[in-house]
Image (tube, rainbow, N blue to C red):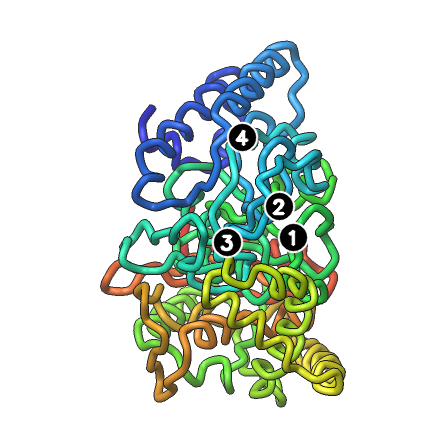
Amino acid sequence: MTPALCLRMITDLAPQLESGEISARELTDACLERIARRNPDLNAFIAVDEDGARAVASRTDDEIAAGRYRGPLHGIPISVKDLIDVKGLPTTAASKIRPKTPAARDAPIVANLRAAGAIVLGKCNLHEFAFGTTGEDSAFGPTRNPHDTSRSPGGSSGGSAVAVATGMSYGSVGTDTGGSIRIPSAACGTVGLKPGFGELPCDGVIPLSRSLDHVGPLARSVVDAWLLYQAMGGQEPRIPPETNPRGALRLGVPRRYFLDHIDPNVRGRFNDALGLLSDAGVTTTDVDVPHASEIASVYLHIVLPEAMTYHSRTLDSRPEEYTPGVRLRLEMGRYVLAEDYLRAQRGREVLRREITAAMTNCAALVLPTLAIPPPPFGVESIAVGGLNDSVRSVTLRLTQAFNLTGHPAISVPCGNTPDDLPCGLQLVGHINQTIELLTVARRVETTIRPV
């Protein structure tokens, strides 16, 4: 199978699957061959279910041939972050802590995808317990960025982003607690959607921070992500109709705080994207989030104690089995006072109101996804725009607010740096309006990155 087949969009493949022009077995074999060739260097997959995937693909071809076609995901091979239960495979969370017992059942989002006809190839690597943004802390070794293997693919859903970017799967399921879908999507050049809080079930997903956790899809285009999102929620996936590419559209640009400290190359790609949007008739207006400078503090005082609560027993009994960086962050959660946690929850509500207010006359906010290009492995701090901060803080800077507030957010590729490293454009929608955000993202994608 040629690499071109592996790198095609779901929307292109679906009609050919329905007509019998290509088969689910062909697509599955293409992905498995790609995994065999690229995974040894990139380490995107922890487990691959070759026999199971091929068996499902053969049954799928029989179903389609018999006229029982289920829709645009029927016969499409996908992958799942190894924080999410897939029946018959262990859920390792990329940690030595987890038992090797296979999951007894699929998480609901996986079951829904199977019901839509998707074929699960295997489980993707991640930053241990999803508590990191680089993908380098894993019991199975780091996942590597396919654009430069000395660099991070982003985290924590780095394996999922690499799998999609390289043609090892056509889509993937990730989780996002502070940016863990959007950060690796920006770093690897894929589309990554964090829906609104509570839209998709987190049952069967190992929690990091129960009040911040989201699940969502990674894909090669906005429409592909849209189809996966629909199916994950138990809806019948349907390819949406085309929209007017030059209708009225206003986007808000939150400059203060969000654009204060940005790598010059990332800023350049962002400004290029705004220029293309302006040429296409999109209006942008500057907006403000008054307490944006408090985002990181509010986030930390929620994520740290909530993560520690889940891990408290194993932190006491088996601390040495965690990777050092993840263990340190979990231990920090012990020192957050209850009054600080409650104060952070109040701050969270303030931020929710302010971001909602900033969007009053806009269809969405627009800002970069990552403030920097994918960082090299082993770098602990980085200077950008006059700010010297930890890599973790810098990579979370533009994404974590929307986990706090529950606004849906999506990252779309918007070009590469001179070193050919991907950059992401982030769009943030109104609460409970993920479909409207996807509609905006589709138009933006078509304008800045024709697919």
In terms of sequence position, does the residue under pointer 1 or pointer 4 come before the other?
Answer: 4
Q: Which mark is residue 157?
A: 3
Q: From mark 4 to mark 3, how far is it between C-alphas?
A: 20 Å
For residue 292, side relative to residue 210 (left or right):
left
Q: Indicate which disc residue 76 carries.
A: 4
Judge by depth and name the residue closer to the eye, 92 or 288. 92
Question: Residue 420, relative to residue 379: is it above or below?
Answer: above
Question: x, y percentage for residue 231?
Answer: 67, 39
Lower position in the chain sequence, tag 2 or tag 1: 2
293 relative position to 407: left or right? left
Give the CA separation, mark 3 to mark 1: 13 Å
Packing grade of label 1 (10 A; few <14, some 14-19, many >=20) is: many
Q: Is residue 211 visible?
A: yes
Query: Is disc 2 in contact with disc 1, using a CB cutoff of under 8 Å?
Result: yes
The residue lying at 39 percent from left, 33 percent from top is 6
User: Whole-percent x and y of residue 139?
Assistant: 45, 51
Is 58 positioned to the left or the right of 206 in the image? Answer: left
Q: How busy is the neighbourhood of tag 2: few (under 14 within 10 Å), some, or many (20 plus)?
A: many
Q: Nearer the viewer, mark 1 or mark 4?
A: 1
Name the residue type under label 3. Answer: Ser
Q: Which residue is mark 1?
A: 206
Of 295 and 323, nearer the camera is: 323
Which label number is shown at residue 84?
Answer: 2
Identify the residue at horizontal 32%, vertical 63% (top origin): 377
Measured Cα–Cα span from mark 2 to mark 3: 11 Å
